Image: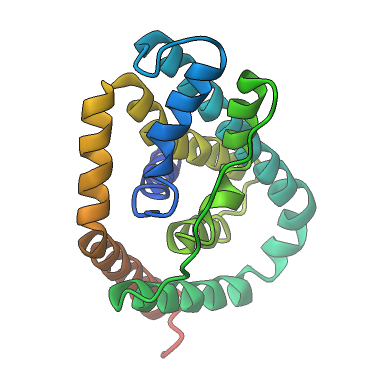
Amino acid sequence: MLSLVFEFFWLGVLTPLPAVCVIPLYPALLARLARTVGGRHDDRRLLALFGVLITLGVISFMTVIGLVFTRWLQTSLTRVIGVVSPIAFVVLAGIGVLLIFDVKIKRKVRPNRLSNPYLSAYLYGFFFGAVVVPCNPGVIVAAFVRASTVSSAAANLANFVAYGLGIGAPLLAFSLVSPAASRWLVNNLVKYNRAINFIAGAIMLSVAFYYLVFVFEVFG
């Protein structure tokens, strides 16, 4: 179970990194939130506070998703897991191919602003999954595919919480480093986005191939 939790955490870490339509907005969002409460755009403590609130929002959202997944879907899923999982891994393989050939949905995302900046930060984190899906569906699908192979409801709930923590980890890191370092990180993520997508796609395709051939033996 601990190894699965660790696996889901790293899937979460990988979720926002290739999302070039979201990540470049993140430092600017933190600076804007800081200014709305009369703070400086480079106030490290204030930026860290908003980073924590966004991360808590992400974890809350993934906890809700985990509860829905385990409470409403898991009972029927365990009965048809032998059918559902191979199909899910075929989908994962397809997404891996799309990432390798850099086929992606072009969409510019703009976070909404609310009058309360603290609530705005939390809600941005809560709905971050909905924001990042159009930009980087691959890793998110990989997480759900992996969850479809786990029959324990408690384990899957822990996995989704760990996944949310992983998603929030890079966002929190951006809020803890200096604005200059944050801009440097964003620029490099954008610069090497093609390589990141290729590597992620190759890993997904390899994982899907392994499960389809050696675990589910679909060609056997």
Query: Which residue sits at x=41%, y=12%?
Result: 40
Q: Most extreme residue toward the right, as rendered?
A: 72
Q: Where does residue 73 sit, x and y in percent of width and height? A: 74, 57
Query: Which residue sits at x=32%, y=74%?
Result: 102
Q: Where does residue 54 sit, x and y in percent of width and height? A: 53, 28
Query: Which residue sits at x=20%, y=37%?
Result: 184
Q: In the rendered image, which quarter is residue 19 located in? A: bottom left
115 in relation to 60, above or below: above
Q: Which of 74 and 112 is in front in this view?
A: 112
From where the camera sits, is residue 198 visible? yes
- In the rendered structure, the answer to whether residue 123 lies left or right of residue 26 reads right
Q: Which of 36 and 15 is in front in this view?
A: 36
- In the rendered structure, the answer to whether residue 87 lies left or right of residue 76 reads left
From where the camera sits, is residue 214 visible? no
Q: How many labels does the image show?
A: 0
Q: Where does residue 24 sit, x and y in percent of width and height? A: 37, 44
134 in relation to 34, above or below: below
Q: Nearer the viewer, residue 56 or 20?
A: 20
Q: In the rendered image, which quarter is residue 191 located in? A: bottom left
- In the rendered structure, the answer to whether residue 111 lies left or right of residue 74 reads left
Q: In the rendered image, which quarter is residue 187 located in? A: top left
Quadrant of the drawing holding the C terminus = bottom left
